[in-house]
Image (cartoon, rainbow, N blue to C red):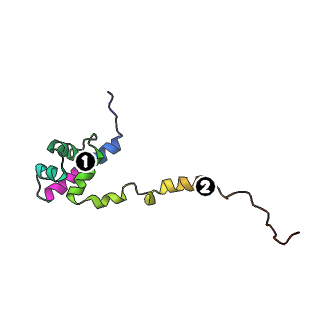
C-alpha cells in the first residue's frame, strides 16, 4: 500500500491546526482524556490530531473543534462566496450573450 505524500505547505498547516487545538484544550484546563471524552474519540486519536498527523480524519477534526466550541469558524472554510478565483473562472466560461439576436417581430405586420 503506497502512502500519499501531502505538499509541505499542507503538512505545515495541519501541524499548526493541531497546535491550535492543543492550546485551546489547555486554555480550558482540559486533559487529553477530557477532550477525547467530550468529542467521543480515543485519546490516541486526539494526540495524533494535536501532533498534526495528516492521516487523522477530517470528521474527527471537526468534532474536536465542535467539542471546543470552535466549530462556528468552520463556516468560512471553502465558502463559495469567498472563492474569488473560482468565481472568476466561472464568469470567464459564461457566454457573452445568450444567443443570436432575433429580428423584432411586429404583431401588426400583415
Q: Residue 10, position in %: x, y?
A: 34, 44
Is residue 8 in the magenta section? no
Q: Which residue is mark 1?
A: 60
Residue 26 placement: quadrant: bottom left
At x 44%, y 57%, the residue is 80
Residue 97 placement: quadrant: bottom right
Label 1: element kind: helix
Q: Residue 4, position in %: x, y?
A: 34, 34
Q: Which residue is mark 2?
A: 94
| Residue furthest right in the image | 110
Q: Is residue 93 left or right of residue 110?
A: left
Please give the range of residues in magenta.
17-27
Quarter containing the C terminus:
bottom right
At x 30%, y 47%, the residue is 58
Q: Is residue 29 left or right of residue 104?
A: left
Q: Nearer the viewer, residue 16 or 88?
A: 88
For the stretch drawn in magenta, the main secondary structure is helix
At x 19%, y 52%, the residue is 39
Amino acid at each position: 500500500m503506497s502512502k500519499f505524500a501531502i505538499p509541505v505547505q499542507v503538512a505545515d498547516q495541519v501541524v499548526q491546526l493541531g497546535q491550535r487545538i492543543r492550546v485551546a484544550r489547555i486554555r480550558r484546563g482540559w486533559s487529553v482524556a477530557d477532550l477525547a471524552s467530550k468529542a467521543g474519540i480515543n485519546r490516541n486519536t486526539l494526540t495524533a490530531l494535536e501532533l498534526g498527523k495528516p492521516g487523522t480524519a477530517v470528521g474527527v477534526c471537526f468534532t474536536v473543534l465542535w467539542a471546543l466550541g470552535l466549530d462556528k469558524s468552520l463556516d468560512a472554510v471553502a465558502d463559495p462566496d469567498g472563492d474569488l478565483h473560482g468565481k472568476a473562472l466561472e464568469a470567464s466560461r459564461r457566454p457573452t450573450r445568450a444567443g443570436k439576436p432575433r429580428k423584432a417581430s411586429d404583431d401588426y405586420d400583415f
